[in-house]
Image (cartoon, rainbow, N blue to C red):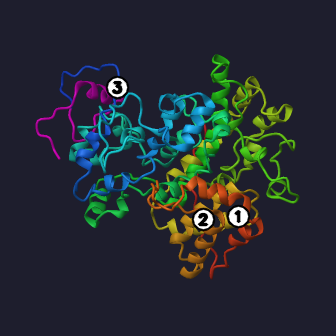
Amino acid sequence: MKNPGWSMPATVIAVVILLGSVPRGFSAPPDAQPLPPPAFRSKGADLCVKCHRSEQGDWCDVATTSAWRHDAHARAHLALSPANERTHAMEQALGIKAAETASCVACHTHPVAEPPIEEETNLLHAGISCETCHGAGSGYLEPHMEKAWRFLSSSEKQAFGMHDLRNPAAKAQNCLSCHLGEVATDRIITHQMYAAGHPPLPAFEMEAFSAGMGPHWKRVWEKSPRIQRLAAEANYETEGASELERSMVGSLVALRETARLVNDYAHATENDAKDRPWPELALYDCQACHHELAVPSWRQEAGYGRLVPGRPSLVRWPRRLAAVAFEQAGMPTDVDALLDPFVTVLNRRPFGTADGLRQAADAGAESFTQIDRAIAALSRLRRDETLAAREQAASERLAAAGRNVGDFESARMLAWALMHGLAGADAWPQDIRTQKISELSRLLALGFPTPAYPLPPSPEKPFWQTSLAAAPDADIDRVRKAFRLPPTDAPPAPLEVIAPPTPR
């Protein structure tokens, strides 16, 4: 892959100089002068596919494109076509064209600034592109073809515009910009859009969704022994230790982003009340209003988290798993209490006021800091001799939380995370683990179709459809029983948790 005639562009050198570090393996000319950081530009997925469609040796194999071409992201643009019945109905109801509406395009296809796909092939699709997730490629396209690129630190690669998706917190934030919403990039699903027929966004557990889409990457410990040895010799930093621990980091990021989303929207409505009217009902927990009117029901058993009954809550689904993540980080936390500044505003008036929620975000700054400290503690954990004990302790905490879970989406988050833990936890017999994984998956509709974006004449339904249908029929008692784990032969080994940094 090496291009012997290539030299590092001056603008890229400037970025590295401004950040105070020149990547190992590269050298800047002695007369290089600092320049303003370049605005990285998209190069287009067709350039990525030219190399990644073929074997690239032990480091990167053909799975990159062979998996991605079936990924629901790659085909997400199909949802914008008026030939799609649901899309056509939404366009009629809202008086829009989905393919020309910023909030639709932002989540369903590549950035507007990216070169268009002139012709789709069996490998190349016009949906969410490589650069949508990995960052605009003008800075790193050529440098990342060099062998020296492999062992650059994440911060050095970021200097070239590449997103650090090995960092579970950065990856979660990247994913949640669509799967939860983000004001800055117009990734907002409104209540109007839901009413017109947009499918509800389900609870999003990063590792389960990644696996369900079909990973188009291999982690270092999944590569050949030779690569693992080279990585160890170079002290190569890879992503968080395990699916379970990355899952818990993702839940903490989701908790933080649910509050940030409301705060950002409250600021946006101050400057653009016409396009961002207040309140935007879709920013809140849908089940606060849309729930069965039976007594008893999940709704009453779930409680109200310090809210006055009848007051819509911020999005709830990250909270139970986030509470377990806090425990695992050595920071037991009452997550509902953490959100008290927002609850106070919401208790005064349904949905609160934009000004009140902006003030709540300011008052809750310490809460954001506490979440970030827990994320930092979990993100530093690695695959070492303590991993098995950490996984067992986390699995037992998840099972305990599941035995008292109160709502469908929170149960799914806990179950997905527990499935990650049970997959490799030898504290329980294999048949018990297999049974629990199967039972939880069936009760909570946790499985994904294969391929992830089934096309006609496939009999499989999209994930959102199967999960939406499962909610009304979920049996809370059976779900709670499914979280019961038999006692292990011995108590889990003591868990040594890395102390979170003290805030300045």
Q: Which residue is drawn at 42% across and 32% down?
A: 111
Res 402 label: 1
Res 170 label: none
Residue 347 percent across, percent down from the top left: 84, 36
Residue 52 visible, this angle: yes
Vertical relation: 130 (above or below) 493? above
Residue 24 covered by magenta stretch = yes
Look at the image and give the residue range highlighted in magenta. 1-27
Q: Is residue 100 left or right of residue 429?
A: left
* Mark 3 lies on residue: 18
Mark 1 burial class by Cα count in 10 Å: few <14, some 14-19, many 20+: many
Magenta: predominant secondary structure element?
A: loop
Query: Mark 1 is on which residue type?
Result: Gly
Closer to the camera in the image, 153 or 352: 352
Q: Which residue is drawn at 28% across and 48% down?
A: 150
Q: Distance between the residues labelled 1 and 2?
A: 9 Å
Q: Which of marks 3 and 2 is in front?
A: 2
Query: Mark 2 is on which residue type?
Result: Leu
Question: Quadrant of the rendered structure where residue 58 is?
Answer: bottom left
Res 418 label: 2
Q: Is residue 393 left or right of residue 229?
A: right
Residue 44 percent across, percent down from the top left: 31, 36
Q: Distance between the residues labelled 3 and 2?
A: 44 Å
